[in-house]
Image: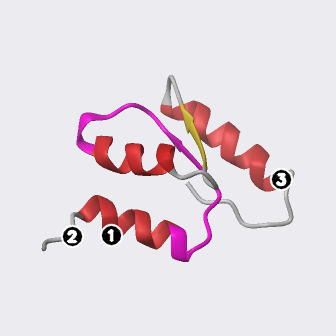
Amino acid sequence: MTVSWSTEVFDELRRAQVRQVACAPDAGLSALIKLCAAAADLHSVTLTTEEEGVALLAGAWLGSSETVSS
């Protein structure tokens, strides 16, 4: 069975203990976005513009003592 690159990236996010992701809708990333959205312990935010992600994740990092990745 072949593992998709989306699953591999998602597994890496899990290993890195990423707890929040921000993404703009994108057909090429749809499988990865669905994996993130389905994870109960991962906060997934859909953005209207990519610029929103910078502010969202910077705020999350500033408000937390834990690392936040995008």
Discs 1/3, front: 1
* Label whose residue precedes the other's in the sequence (2 or 1): 2
In the picture, which quadrant includes the C terminus?
Answer: bottom right
Q: Nearer the viewer, residue 36 or 68?
A: 36
* Label whose residue precedes the other's in the sequence (2 or 3): 2
Residue 27 % position (x, y): 25, 35
Task: Confirm whether the magenta stretch covers residue 24.
Answer: yes
Residue 53 % position (x, y): 59, 39
Q: Are marks 2 and 1 in contact (CB under 8 Å)?
A: yes
Give the residue type at disc 2. Answer: Val
Q: Which mark is residue 3?
A: 2
Q: Are marks 2 and 3 in contact (CB under 8 Å)?
A: no
Q: Which mark is residue 65?
A: none
Identified at 21% across, 64% down, the residue is: 4
Name the residue tied to disc 3: 62
Q: In the image, is residue 17 above or below residue 45?
A: below
Q: Which mark is residue 8?
A: 1
Q: Please report the bounds of the magenta region as a residue range.
A: 14-28
* Label whose residue precedes the other's in the sequence (1 or 3): 1
